[in-house]
Each structure stands twice: as structure tokens, then as C-alpha cells.
């Protein structure tokens, strides 16, 4: 697989006379891919049924003539103003019942039949014109599904669609009543038409009701998405891509991933640190100009799993300060290169910078580009050019298989978001904590969906927080050393407590008798070091205790093959557990300096120094914000 | 009076074949009362006018046959979905104007005429069938009035009823204008029909307007409640009960209490500590697994006052971790027993655990029961059984009279909620601070309504924060040593400042010339130790100064008989004031170890160790979470 | 110019028999002005078209007979309840789409045509009756425009008016599309009628859209205001006044100021400290009973600029504790006098206390007056009387010209509120930080609007945060030593980034290549002392570097005549910069003790000790909360 650089470009924002020069400069920078079109609906179809393809034809020609491969986006995340004249009720509705109005982007409800059809039509129009055009090397469908909390909509269209979805899922209303436990507070329904969306209830709605709505909402994304997939598949053989946004979890990316060819994501390390990460003030201060050392790698590994055959890109790479986080500092010199190389080391085919030139107007005018608004090179351009030179020298990468697997499951996120039981209990946070612990010990990781049925390639598998474990997964875990829990397999598919109570794993006599959620400052020390916090389960059963609290309460029970973790460890205890399990699994670990991270490909070891000071590993000095690699 | 245990049970949640075994096991645990039915409307009347009493008949028979006394609840806090077809406008409306929808519970507006009548009808139906059934030993009306902030509703029904209520109260609109001071900002009304609910105003509405709405809202609870009282009184001689929820203050419990026979409340010590209590982080950490040492006792004493002839129960006792607080830790071993005994020591007739078996489905699936979902005994069951054995050995208790009285007044809560003058000024918090101070000195307390006219039985009476003192109370205070203030008798009944200015107490020359509210960190030291915070009054007058700040500003002025406290003391100053007054009143105090609390009945002294470490008193060692008692 | 005292008085709140005695006591206190009428519409016109002037005639007579000069207010901030029967849609609408209801004050939308006309009519009625009455010495129009966030309204009336305003501004829709950059996310409009208000969008609206709405909203205030101006100008020669509220910035006070004769503002130092000021906890604790040492002076200097020919008053002066801040402590003894004298030292003609007697009813019953509700003198009265005696001894004051000018510009506030780029970036806060720094060095300051074209009278001019610098100002800056930045002249008038990029100042080779916003705890040390925080620009260009970070990044570049500041300095660095520039400008500075502030008139130096402890300057001891003055 060949590494390549790309860039996001908006010809409609610039005078046509600048295009050729821009294209030439991209190529000069070492860029070979360019994404266009995804926000340009009002220029492609300025009035209903009035199409203006001329400018787009010329833009494509100019870019392609310069030697660039084009990704063409469907512009469906930005329906023009006139679309609301056709469909005044197409807007999503927020949980308070207010329509989310026109004036920015993503102003549509996934459940609106009319807008879904209109999205298919514009995709078909583009497919008709460019589907067989060899200069179009890939398609991007829509843009960042779910960004700005747009998956859950409380519109009339959503209500109607939800009722239909429920009728299809449960067939008869008594089945729904049983599944949701509506007898609990006389919430029983007599008709599917009685069921409302789970917002604005007096106190929390039935968890199964909310979970059903979350599943429905994810399914509505697929239903919406597939109309465009069908339109393009019928008209083009170029690969289809979607660009997911970091820590957007309200729909199942694996579902979308299966329907298209390449996964991509939008990587904004410094924005995420400020806006989307639980971490101490000290941690946030230390990595203020670098981003969290594990957040990007986590998503890289996630999207390698989401992409068909492991194909994935970074579609938007932060090139400098952004505009949308609470605070927007600049990257340390070197970080743009580090982020790019980290993506490649995790198997990215393409790293595409967002955006070519900082737009001097509109919402993102304070978002850096590779060029400044006045066409002067921003620091990101220099680093991108360096990466361009470096990948030319080291072109091939195999994705390989890591020794460690981490099971990731979107419905588990929805399940625990529905029933957190402790303020701030977050599946994603738990997953990232586990991931961090593995990485602090130098390990490379594959993220794997819960639908996996063969884990033989892995030495160690972790499945924390997996709400309901599929049978095939339970079976596959016997192929390896596994750590399940906390909060794994404790509920049914309808979010109730099973009897026998979980985790109910064959071959492991452990029952979670009780759970506790704790306020942030509460901790219980573990014998031997570290402690547990946030979430503590009372474990019972005959399995040996591997870790316990100083009071003798089991924290990990298991047989070193199959093990259950009954609490949320702090970093020190995570480290001890990982070392213990890695030894049992025959995996070598090493304690890395703070901020240093490794990633092994089949042939090389890469090292990334996220820390703000120089460090070293194996005698190699690695400067702050620097990257190193050497053959394995 | 005989002590007894009870439990809350939901036969509709379990297969009928489990009922008999459950009943037998209850009896075996020492339980003699069982509450049923209060959430079962959709099973009793699955469609409008279609009644299914068979299952309930059989459940009653099974439970009674096992020897259990039944409390039957009216299910009016959970109207079925079809009720909304009859009354689409029956929902309460939140302060932002959104209807609070079906899908959980308490989805009704107290002012809706149709739903009020429907509630009376279902109560009558139940009365018709079971009113003379000797197996029904008590009735519970509705469930936790006011839980989930459901007293104040901004619906059309409420608006219309408010106008009617105002017309009845003020008779003519000029009287209302004068009472509310509407001349202030040209807010004068010409007709009662001009008056809106006091939400969504540009800035705060007239305080008297808001206070009137709060009084009206409390009255609407009574109006709603009395329909059910009438329906049941006509059909049954069994006592009527309501189960109040902790720190729900938006309606006058004394009003409800007078209309029924027994007060009960729902005691969730650990949930309250997390969710409903102002306290330092240190305090919350220390009592994380026990609950606050005074919160339960306060409510016990309150409901002894609310209950007719002092009759009161704990209807729902926390048996393990709950689900609804921000964080939900487990009780220390022993706490379920401690909480139960503390209730008995304060005069409870019955302590009833919520619930028998943890429901594996719906909103409360993470709320512990005495049994786990898989029928295994949870820790609470063992402790309940121990209490069952212990009360069998020590069956009698007299409620007696404490030496100390604390005046509690719901309208004062509404008054200061309407006009706090300092962020976080809370009448309840002030009352609890006073109560804590008394209890830290080992004192037993009666809570007494402000309607009291005879205090001769008490040696010392405290009336902090009592917005408007009734004349009878002012007179009664002369019978005893009294501490009035801070913020007592400073406003008229219509929430304006009287002239002469308060407290205007006969025989005490003190005037509150000015008040200040202070941010949380501000403190003014008192001469001799301790300090004042939150709220400081400037006191003037000829009465002797008993306590003062280091700058010489009076904090307590009085004659050791009638005294006025002009500030919010911290714990150290509260202790000094209590010791001083107790001496003046001839009451013996003792400084208790941290977390230890006492309660004297007529015959015994009980000691409760809320602390997480062993302690001792009078040479008796009391383990963490343990209870002790001995003859006085 | 003669100094005088005034007071706000509400005859409609008190029995008529008290008026004469109140008037006499005012005069005795040294008060010569009295403001009446501004909340009395429901008494003047109790029903539509029914006028009752008798009581007002008698009140005017009584007050004037006592020797008081009357300011008569138009009561348009408090439309009576019946006005809503005429105009049910006259209410402003909040950003969530809820009407802001009747029941307090300011319940109108500035864009409502009907209410605007009705406001003109009541002003005309008052003008007809009292316009030529010599006892009416001034008029106040409305009251505190913008208080309670009432400028931005999202009503239907506002939407329609906004479209009209846009059509007038941009003439054709393509011009608007270009100006707003709507091509960015296909936000292009085809008709002005397509444009909605910028609330409830999915993510932020186009900055130029929001800025246009803010400009429109300010213009709507003027449009509303001018109807009353016209009505009164036609009927009276008495000066017109408006009383602005502290830190209300949503409309352009300079616009309003140009249309009337005298600016006045409402000064609540302790309320502002609690509610409207970014400051450390330590700072807020130190000045809890005094108010911030610079907040009042800043507004004094601002309104001297807003008032025509520099004429300005304090219309409402805090006389004791207020009711509306989160916490409401009392002033230190002496502060009411200090605040009064500080206003005079900054050139106020009149300081008018709010209010005469504490109203015992309605929303402000806890707001102190000069008298208590029981007619006893509150501490403020004594201090006011002292000021009255003192000004009689020292009657004249010239406003003079300060050596330093600070440019203040309302549109810059709207610009950065629209596009803060860092949470908490506030133009006002930045301005106040600059102002504080100048004042800590003993300097007197003039605030000057950005429309200024002659700065020859100043030695040093600061223009931080000035979004877009007018050409005339850029030219005028060459007359003096100037400090521009941070964030000055970085955007176009339509809130986009200009090319060449800013600050683009003739004669100064500096370009802001990049900006960063930083979280509150982040700091970068400056070489030589102090540091920068919040906002850091990357400066490029050939100009000399005057200040830099320890890493060598320029912080100030310039030639000591024209200088650009590329970051937000902390107090220590501000001090160094001010000292450096003052030296360059030939202005003498002195480091003042903490809490001490100076103000020079043409003839005298005044010193104000805001600190809670005694201090001294030039060998003069100044007690806490005391004032001193001596000839220059």
C-alpha cells in the first residue's frame, strides 16, 4: 500500500484564475489527492432543478491536469435554502422541541423522506455526470454524519418513522411492552401509534425506550446513507468514502463502513484535547499544543476496523489552530508532521489536510489552512511538504495485525449513555483508558468489532464495557488471553438484567453481585499498588482472584486465560493489569517515557514523542514533537 | 406502639407462581406489612373502563394468606397512556413552556379538572372493591407528591385555576394590586383574567406574584388530594397514608398530613447525600457510604409532626445502592440496620424497605432490592432480618416529647425561594444547620409546625428563617427559652417589609436594620470563636448583646429567654450558641464524637455511629455503622 | 460646571401626605435634583386613553415648591398590562423562541411598530403637558436600554424588520451573499425574505450574519429612541437624558448619545463586582464591600465621551446593599461618599442616588435607599449629606482633557462576541484590563470613540481590540504615541480577514500571521517580567521588537511612536508596557499602592482608596474607603 498526501479544496471560494496556481503548488508540496465539492450544493444547483456544472467541470479539469486525483463529495450536508421551501419540515428538532434552523450546516433530519430522496437525486446527478470520469478517483458521501449532535432528532418525521421501525422490530405491541418492561410504571402501550419520542418526559424514560430510539436513529443514518450509496454504485466504480468525525458515536460506523469502500476520519488533535476528552488539568496543560497522545491512534485503529479490508484515510488533518474548540492554541512545530506520520504508521493510505487555504470569510475563517489567507505558507505547509518528501522515500506500508485486540461496539456506547448509573460513566472514556494503558506499555493494538468470530491471531484481547457479548465473541475469546469487564455482558439486548446475572461467561465462575458508581474523588486502593475509581462491582464466584483491593474485595478474577475485571482501574492499576496479562499472553511490554508512543508495522517500529521535552528510547533520542522509525 | 417491618412489592412484575414463595420469605424475614398497587393502573384498568381485578384479588389473597398486612396504593401517579387520549391537556408544563410528556411517571398537572376527577374515580373503584376488606390494613394515596419537581406547572389549566384562586383570595383586583405592590413597575392589573403565571418574565416577577403562585400550587395539591381522600373515607375505615419524598418542599405537608392518618416518607440516605444536600467535599466523602448523619433524623422528626397524633412510617427504606443519584455507592455493612433502628428510635411504627426484589427491567433496574434479580439475598435482606429479630425482642416504643423544639414552616421555604437575596440561601439548609448543631450536642428534637400555640412542654425552641411569625407562636415562645432568626419575622404575609421593621418581637428590643448576603468564601469572625457567613443582619436596639463579631457587631441579642440571632453561624459558632442557650434552658448537652448521634425515647437512649470508624460514648464502644441502646 | 446631588423618587409608591416631608428632607440632605415618573405609566394612563395627571401635577408642585429641580422620565420601559391587549405580539422573544412575558419590566421588542408608536405617543402626551413647564429641568427617555438582555429579540417583528434593514444595507442579495461569504456552506440566499434570525441554527451561523443582526439590533434601539426624541424636542427645550446601565454593550451608546444632551449611567459598584466582572476570587474578596477600583471610573470616562460636550451624570448611585447580584454585601462605611466624589472628579454634573426610600414591596424591596422603609436614615443618607456639604464648599469642576486616550468602540464588542475564537474573549474585559493598567500607574484617561479624527491633545493613545480601524483614526494616531492591538484592525467591516492581513498600519511593518487562544491557566513568560495569556498573536515584519517572550516571540513591535501589541498581557506585563510607552510619550507615572486610584482635574488631584486598609501617597495618609484631594 502506498502512502499519499491529500488536501481539501474549495474552488467555489476562490477566483477561477487562482485554481491552476493552487493546483501546481499542491503538487509541488507533494500532495496527490484533492477533495472538492462537499459543501457546494448552492453552486451546483443554485435554484431547484437549475444545474450549473460548468465551474465544477473546469475545476476538475484544472486540478486533474495538474496531476491531482480527485475525491468528489456529495453536498448533502448543506442543503440550499430553497430546499426548505420544498420541505419546510425537513429540519431536525432538538430535545427541547425547537427546530434546528437553516444558517449553518447539517440542517436536516435523517428521517425526512423528502430530503432523503432529494439527497439521492443530487448524488445521482453527480454520478450521471462524473461517475465514469477517470479523474474522479473516489467519492465522499455527505460529510461528518453526526457532527453537531445531529443524529438524534425529535421531529414529527422521526416520530412517525420511529413508530414504523418499532412495529417492524417488535411486530406486536405486547412484545414491545414485555421487552421494555412498561408494566413498571403503567407505561404500557396499546398501539405503536401511542409511542412518542423519549424526550421531555417527567423523569427518565424507560431505558429500553431510549435505547430503541438510539438504535433507530443509527438505523436512520444507514437508511439515509444507502440511498446515496445506491445512486453512486449504479453510476460509478470509484470507491466510496465517508469522513467520520472524532468521538461521534451516535450511529454505528461499522454499519456505514460495510456499505462503502474506505473509512476516513477527521483528525483535530488539539481541538479534541480541549473539547472532547476527559483528562486532568495537568494532562491538558502538558499536551495543549500537541493533542492527547492516544486519541488519534485510537481513532486510526478504529477506522482501520471500520474500513473494508482495513482501508482507511485521514480525510481532514488539522494543519494549525482551529476555530471551534473552547480554546484554540497552535501546534508545536513538528506536530503536523508527527500527526501525519502517526496516521501512516497505523496504516492510513492517505493523509489529507484541511484545508488548502484559510478561508477569510464565514464560520471557519479562524481555522488555519496550509496557506494563510494572503497565500503565504503557514507552518503546516512546510511540515506537509517534509512529509511529502519522506513518504516518497519510504513508500510502502503493510497494515499487518497487532498482537492485541480491543473490542469496540457502538451499541455499548448507546447502552451506557442511556443507563450510566454514575454521572460521567462513558463507554468511550473507559475504552480510551484501556487503550492508553496498553499504549503506555508500548503495545500496538487492533480495534475489532463485537461481531468478530475469530480472534486466533491475537495474543491478548480486551473487551471492557461490552454491554451484551455475542455468543460468537464469547467463543472466540477462548482462542486467546482475554480480559472482559468492567460492565461487560451485564445486560440483555433490551437493556434489562439477565438471570443468571452477568457476566455469565462459560468457564469462568464470576458473578457481578452488585455495582457501585463513585464520585470522581473517591478511590479504593488495590493491594500492590494503584486503585479503582468511578465504577466498582462486587464480584462473587469460585474463580481465582488475581487482583484485589486492600480490603480483600476481588478486582480481577480469572484463570489468566479468561479474566474478568470488576472495576474501573486508575492508570497505575491498569498498568499492573496489562503487565500481568501480557506476561500471561507472552507479549513483551516496556514502560514508555511520558508522552512517547510506539506503533509497529510489519517491518518497522515508529516512535512519536507527544511530550514537550526531548526523550529517548532504546538509546535513541527523540526530540519534542518528533518522529522516529527503524526496522524491527 | 409496636414496631414492625414492611416491604414494597409489585406482584404485577413477577410471574404469579412466584408470589406465594415471595410472601413466605417476607414473613420469614420478619416482615409483616406489604405495600402494593401504587404503579399498577395499566394492569387494573388496561383500557378505559375495562377493569381487571382478578390478578389483584389473587395477589392480595396470597399475601394475606401468608400473614402479611396489606397497604394498597392508589395508582394515580402513573396514569395509563390512554388517559392522554381522554385529556390531551392533562400534562404539566415546565417553566420553559414545554409539556412534560408521557413515558415515565407523575405526568399530570394538579390543576387539571378532568384528571383530578379521574383520580377520584379510580380511588373510588378501589374503595368499592377493597374498602371493607379486612386484609387491606391501610391505603396509600398517590406516590411521592412533588417528586421530579412536579408541583409547579405552567399549563393552561394551571393558569385558569390560578386566576380563580386569586379571585377567591383577593376578592377584588385592587386588593391584589396593593398586596403585590404592582404599582412598582406599572404591573397593575385591571382584571384577574389579566394575570399570567410567573414564568418567562423578562426579569424576576413580583415576589408576591411568585409566592402566590407557590401557595396556589400547594393548595392545588390539596385540592387534588382531597378528592381521593373523600373517595376512600366514604368506602373504608382503614388509615390513609401518603409517602412524602425527602426534601420535597413545594407543597405544605402539614396540610396533607391533617387530612390523612399516618405520615410516611421515603428514606434514601445515600442518594440524598449525593443529590440533595449542601455539604463540603470532605463531608460528602466521609459519609459516602452512610448518608448524612442528620438528614434522616430531621425527616423522621418532621414527619412525626406531620402525622396525625405523631403517627409516621418510613414507607420506602433504601436497602442498598440506588439508581437515581449522580453517583450511587453501596451502604457500609450495617447501615441498613442502622437506618431502620434510627427510624424506630424516632418513633416510626413501620419501616418498609423499597423494594422486595430488584426489578431487572425499566427505569429502576439498578436500584437494589432486598433480593437480587436472581432471587439471591442482597446484603440488605440479612440486615432487615436482623432488625426483624431485634424488634421482636424490644417491641414497644413511646414517642415521648423532646426537650427541644424546632419550628418548621413550608411557606417560609417558598418565601425565601422566591426572594433569596443571596444565591443559595435556602430555608431548608438553614433549618438543617440548626438541627445539626443541636444534634452534635446530643439533643433530641421535636419538629413543630408554625401553627403551634403551646410550647410549654419544651425547654428550648428555635425558629430560624420563619418568614412571618404567627401571633400565637410569638406568644407561645414566652413559655420557653427561644432563639429566633436569622431572617425571622422580617416580612409580611404578602412578602413585603413591614413597618415597624422586624423581627418586632414583644419584649425584645431588636430591629434588623439591614441585611447582607455574602459569597460562600466570605466569613466574619465571632468574638470567642466561630464565625458567621452567607447571611448577616445589622441588628439595632437596646437588647443585650450575647454574641458579637470581632468588630463588635451584634450576632445574638436577647435576654437568655427570648433571643434573636442575626446571622448564619458556622458550625463552631452554632455549637457555642447552642451550649449557651441550653445552659440558660437547663438542658444538659454533650459534645459527641464526629458522626455519632443520639436519640432518647422515654425509656431508652439510642446511639448511632454514622462515622466510618469505631467510636465510643460513656465508655461504650460503638463500631462503625453500628447501633446501641440502653435504658435511660 | 457646578456639582450637584440628586435622588430617584417614586411619589406613586407613597401616600401623598408624605411627599412634602420627603421633599424637605431631600433639600436638607443637600439634594437639588429629583427624578420621577419613569415607571409610572399605569398611573398616568391606567386604561387606554384614560389619563390621570392630577397626582403627577401635585407631585411636581410639591417637589418644585421645596426647591428641587425635576427630571421627568418617559415610562416606556414599563408598558401597562393593557398594552398587550393592543399589541399581543409586542413582546421580545428569547433565543429559544419563547416570548418574554409581562410581569416585570422591559417587556417589549424594539422592532414592534405599534409599540414604538405608542411610546412616541406617551412621550408626546407628557411633552404636551410638561414640556414648557419650567419646573421640569430635564427629561429621561425610557430607562436602562438593554438591561436584562433586552436588545436582541428573536420575534416575528424583529425578523421582518431585519429583512428590511438588510435590503436597505445591501441593496441586492448577491451583495449580501458576497459580504457574508454564504458560499461557504451553501448558505446562499436568493431573496432577502429567505433570511432568518441567527438563532437556533445547527451550529454557529455565519459571523457576518450574526454581526449584521447585532448592528441591526443596535439600530433598532435608535429607531425606537428617536421617536421619543422627536416627540420631546417638539415640545420642550429641556435637556434630554438617558440612563445607561453598566456593562450593557448590545447597542451603540455613542449613537444614542449624539441624539440627546446628557449621558447618565447607573452605578452599582458592588453589584457589578459580583455579577459583571471577570476577576480572581482574591480580587473579589478584597473588594467585596467596595466594588472594583476601576469599573466605575471606566464608565465615568466612557459616559463623558458619550455625553454631548462631555456632559454626563450618575443617574442612579448605589446607596447601600442591592438586591440583584448573586450576593449583596453592604458597602464599607465611606464608600457611598467615595463613589460620589469619584464621579465628580471624573466630571459628573450630578450624582443622583437610587433611591430615596427603600420600597418595602415588589422586586426591589431588598434594595437599599437613602432611607429605610421605616423612614430611618440608612448609612447612605449620612454620607450623601456629607457630600452635599462638601460640594457646597468646592463647587466648580472643569472636565479638562486627560493626557491619555483609550479608544472605545461598540461594534468591536459585537464583533468579538460574534467571533471570540477563545471562550471568554471579551472586548470589554480587554479594554478594562488596559484601563486598569493605566490607572495602576496613576494616569487619568479620556475614553474616545473610534470616530475620532484628532488626537493631537493626547500624549498616548491605546486602541486594543479595535476590530476595524477607521482611516481617520489611523491617521490621527500619527499625532501621538500609540499602542494598537491585540486584535486590532484584523477584520473587515463584514467580519472577514482582509488581504493584506492586519493590522496593516501605515508606517509599521507588522503582520499578524496567526492567532492562538489559550485556556485560563496557560501563560507564556515575557522576557524581563510578566507574561501573556488568553490571546497570543504571531507577529511578523520588520518593525523593531520592544517586548518579547522568553522564547523570543515578539509581543510588542513598534517604533515607540506607533506600536502594535500582539497578545493579552497579564498585569505585570501591562505595567511594564505602560511605563515604557509613558516614558516615550513624556508622561510621568507612579506605581500606586494596591487599591489606590488617582484622578486629576484641571486644578486638583483626587485620590480614592478602594482598599480595605489605610494607605498613603506622597506622604498623605488616606484611610480605607476615604477620599482626598489637593491642588495640582
Image (tube, coloured by chain):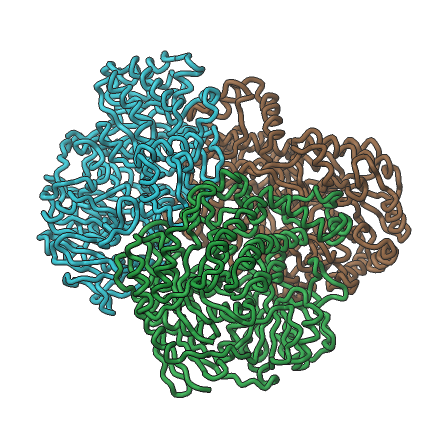
Chain colours: A cyan, B green, C brown
Q: Residue at x 69, y 73 (%)?
A: B474
Q: Is residue C371 above or below residue A320?
A: below
Q: Residue at x 49, y 58 (%)?
A: B131
Find residue C397 and report its horizontal and vertical position in percent.
Answer: 77, 50
From the viewer's perspective, is A5 left or right of B562?
Answer: left
Along the line of sight, which residue is nearer the eye, C119 or B615? B615
**Residue at 77 percent of width and 39 percent of height:** C240
- In which quadrant will I find the C terminus of chain C? bottom right
- The reply, left or right, for residue B8 in relation to residue C599 is left
Q: Return the residue nearer the eye: C300 or C129.
A: C129
| Relative side of A619 to B303, left or right | left
- Residue A415 showing in the rendered view: yes
Residue B227's spot in the image, x, y percent?
57, 53
Residue A417 image point, x, y percent: 34, 46
Report whether A528 appears left or right of C275: left
In the image, B70 versus C469, the foreground residue is B70
Residue under the point 35% across and 49% down = B362
Between B551 and B481, the one nearer to me in the picture: B481
Amino acid at each position: 500500500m502506498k502512502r499519499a498526501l491529500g488536501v481539501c479544496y474549495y474552488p467555489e471560494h476562490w477566483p477561477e484564475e487562482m485554481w491552476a496556481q493552487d493546483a501546481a503548488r499542491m503538487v509541488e508540496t507533494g500532495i496527490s489527492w484533492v477533495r472538492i465539492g462537499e459543501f457546494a450544493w448552492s453552486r451546483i444547483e443554485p435554484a431547484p432543478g437549475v444545474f450549473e456544472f460548468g465551474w465544477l467541470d473546469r475545476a476538475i479539469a484544472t486540478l486533474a491536469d495538474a496531476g491531482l486525483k480527485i475525491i468528489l463529495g456529495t453536498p448533502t450536508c448543506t442543503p440550499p435554502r430553497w430546499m426548505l421551501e420544498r420541505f419546510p419540515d425537513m429540519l431536525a428538532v432538538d430535545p427541547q422541541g425547537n427546530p434546528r434552523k437553516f444558517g449553518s450546516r447539517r440542517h436536516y433530519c435523517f428521517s425526512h423522506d423528502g430530503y432523503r430522496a432529494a439527497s439521492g437525486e443530487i448524488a445521482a446527478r453527480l454520478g450521471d455526470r462524473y461517475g465514469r470520469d477517470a479523474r474522479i478517483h473516489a467519492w465522499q458521501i455527505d460529510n461528518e454524519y453526526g457532527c453537531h449532535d445531529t443524529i438524534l432528532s425529535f421531529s414529527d418525521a422521526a416520530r412517525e418513522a420511529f413508530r414504523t421501525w418499532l412495529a417492524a422490530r417488535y411486530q406486536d405491541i405486547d412484545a414491545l411492552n414485555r421487552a421494555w418492561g412498561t408494566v413498571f410504571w403503567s407505561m404500557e402501550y396499546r398501539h405503536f401509534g401511542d409511542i412518542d419520542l423519549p424526550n421531555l418526559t417527567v423523569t427518565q424514560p424507560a431505558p429500553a425506550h431510549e435505547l430503541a430510539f438510539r438504535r433507530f436513529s443509527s438505523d436512520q443514518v444507514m437508511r439515509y446513507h444507502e440511498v446515496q450509496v445506491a445512486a453512486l454504485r449504479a453510476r460509478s466504480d470509484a470507491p466510496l468514502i465517508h469522513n467520520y468525525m472524532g468521538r461521534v458515536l451516535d450511529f454505528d460506523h461499522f454499519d456505514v463502513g460495510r456499505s462503502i469502500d474506505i473509512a476516513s476520519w477527521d483528525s483535530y488533535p488539539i481541538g479534541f484535547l480541549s473539547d472532547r476528552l476527559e483528562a486532568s488539568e495537568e494532562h491538558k496543560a502538558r499536551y495543549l499544543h500537541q493533542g492527547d497522545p492516544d486519541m488519534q491512534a485510537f481513532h486510526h485503529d478504529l477506522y482501520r476496523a471500520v474500513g473494508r479490508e482495513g482501508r482507511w484515510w485521514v480525510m481532514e488533518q488539522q494543519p494549525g489552530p482551529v476555530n471551534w474548540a473552547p480554546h484554540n492554541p497552535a501546534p508545536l512545530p513538528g506536530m503536523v508532521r508527527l500527526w501525519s506520520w502517526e496516521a501512516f504508521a497505523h496504516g492510513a493510505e492517505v493523509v489529507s489536510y484541511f484545508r488548502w487555504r484559510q478561508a477569510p470569510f464565514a464560520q471557519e475563517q479562524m481555522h488555519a489552512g496550509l496557506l494563510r489567507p494572503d497565500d503565504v505558507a503557514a507552518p503546516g505547509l512546510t511540515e506537509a511538504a517534509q512529509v511529502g518528501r519522506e513518504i516518497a522515500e519510504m513508500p510502502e506500508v503493510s497494515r499487518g495485525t497487532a498482537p492485541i485486540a480491543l473490542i469496540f461496539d457502538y451499541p455499548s456506547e448507546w447502552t451506557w449513555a442511556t443507563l450510566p448509573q454514575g454521572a460521567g460513566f462513558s463507554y468511550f472514556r473507559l475504552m480510551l483508558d484501556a487503550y492508553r494503558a496498553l499504549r503506555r506499555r508500548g503495545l500496538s493494538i487492533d480495534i475489532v468489532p463485537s461481531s468478530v468470530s475469530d480472534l486466533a491471531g491475537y495474543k491478548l484481547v480486551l473487551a471492557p464495557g461490552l454491554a451484551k457479548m455475542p455468543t460468537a465473541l464469547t467463543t472466540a475469546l477462548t482462542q486467546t488471553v482475554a480480559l472482559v469487564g468492567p460492565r461487560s455482558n451485564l445486560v440483555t439486548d433490551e437493556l434489562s438484567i439477565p438471570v443468571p446475572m452477568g457476566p455469565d461467561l462459560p468457564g469462568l465462575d464470576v458473578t457481578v453481585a452488585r455495582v457501585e458508581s463513585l464520585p470522581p474523588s473517591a478511590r479504593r486502593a488495590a493491594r500492590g499498588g494503584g486503585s479503582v475509581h468511578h465504577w466498582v462491582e462486587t464480584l462473587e464466584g469460585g474463580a481465582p482472584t488475581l487482583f484485589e483491593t486492600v480490603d480483600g474485595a476481588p478486582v480481577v478474577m480469572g484463570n489468566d486465560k479468561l479474566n474478568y475485571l470488576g472495576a474501573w482501574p486508575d492508570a497505575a492499576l491498569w498498568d499492573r493489569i496489562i503487565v500481568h496479562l501480557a506476561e500471561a499472553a507472552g507479549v513483551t511490554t516496556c514502560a514508555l517515557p511520558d508522552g512517547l508512543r510506539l506503533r509497529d508495522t510489519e517491518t518497522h517500529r515508529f516512535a512519536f514523542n507527544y511530550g514537550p521535552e526531548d526523550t529517548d528510547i532504546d538509546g535513541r533520542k527523540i526530540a519534542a514533537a518528533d518522529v522516529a522509525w527503524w526496522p524491527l
